Amino acid sequence: MLSYIIRRLGGALAVLFGISIVTFILAYAVPSDPARMIAGPKASLATVMAIRHQLGLDAPIYVQYIRYIWRLLHWNLGMSYVYNLPVTTLIAQRIWPTASLALSAWIAELVIGIPLGIYTARRARKLADYVVSILALVGISLLIPWLGIVLLYWLGFKIPIFPLGGTGGITHLILPALTYGITGAAAYTRLLKSSMLEVLRQDYVRTARAKGATESRVVNRHVIRNALIPVITYGGIDVGYLLGGVVLLEVTFNWNGLGILAYNAISESDIPVIMGTVLLTALLVVLFNLLVDIVYVFVDPRIRYS
């Protein structure tokens, strides 16, 4: 297992290196001049050129990339063009709000999706199954900004139970988490239902029933654990989608996190911040996928990594 983890971490470094190249090229392909944006529209050409030289933007792109990698090897993500602060400081200020939002949204997905998946699997081809399946289809079709605005209007403005957006405590987290939970839980419901139906047809399940085990014992002891393997796989992939969805959640609910930081950086051509947030996101996706692979071993002891 240890050698497997080391190999995966080595692969992660290669992935991050490739992402850094692609992101760097794409960031410089944007037809905008960070020096002009910093100097302002009325600044003279000499001032713009001086800022460009100060930022090192007048060097060839490959030289700029080598300088960037050199700084990266020294744990330096550079200075923000807009905030005039180290990118690591900006990320450190925003990472906890984003982590709390992402974690609460993911938990909301699981809390809604997994019980509904078990419920529909145990009542397959009955009225409750059809009703939940239709609701799941509706949920997965909803757009995060639209549903977020609807919830803000009803539960934040018409019936003022929750705050109207902004960053804060648990009460500020409920509406964004509920929004993502409703739109994302449907995938877990459908996936777990189909996985449980497949496991329910296995011989060892029929054997357990023949020995007189109750249906609850069969489901809880023999079915759910084996049916969770594809759900765990999807959970790791879902983290990548979640990091993208957090941007929409933060913009919709005015949540001051990494998503807003990345969104503003793209609109202002703040290349060091763009690079820093993209690399951090890629690193988190890789680490979560590695974590999923490790969890496999505990869920299904038959899985071994050589």
Image (cartoon, grey):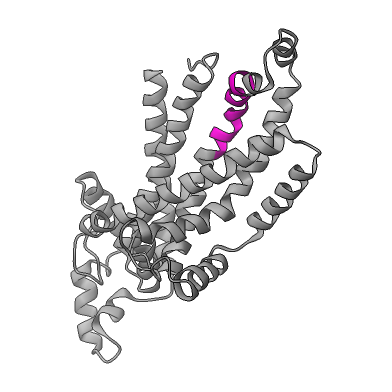
How many numbered badges does the structure rendering display? 0
Closest to the observer, 192 or 84: 192
Residue occupying image coordinates x 64% and y 56%: 139
Classify residue 191 as left or right of residue 29: right
Residue occupying image coordinates x 24% and y 54%: 92
Query: Where's residue 251, x and y in %?
Result: 43, 68
Whether residue 15 is in magenta: the answer is no
Q: Choose top left, top right, bottom left or bottom right for residue 81.
A: bottom left
Classify residue 133 as left or right of residue 220: right
Closest to the observer, 262 or 125: 125
Query: Where's residue 30, x and y in %?
Result: 43, 70
- Taken as a whole, is the magenta stretch helix, strand or loop? helix
Query: Where's residue 150, x and y in %?
Result: 55, 70
Residue occupying image coordinates x 27% and y 92%: 42
Q: Choose top left, top right, bottom left or bottom right for residue 224.
A: top right
Q: With respect to residue 106, does 218 lie above or below?
A: above
Q: With respect to residue 184, does 266 lie above or below?
A: below
Classify residue 121 as left or right of residue 110: right
Query: Where's residue 239, x and y in %?
Result: 48, 45
Closest to the observer, 115 or 295: 115
Classify residue 182 as left or right of residue 250: right
Q: Which residues are magenta?
A: 220-234
Residue occupying image coordinates x 44% and y 32%: 290
Q: Choose top left, top right, bottom left or bottom right for residue 47.
A: bottom left
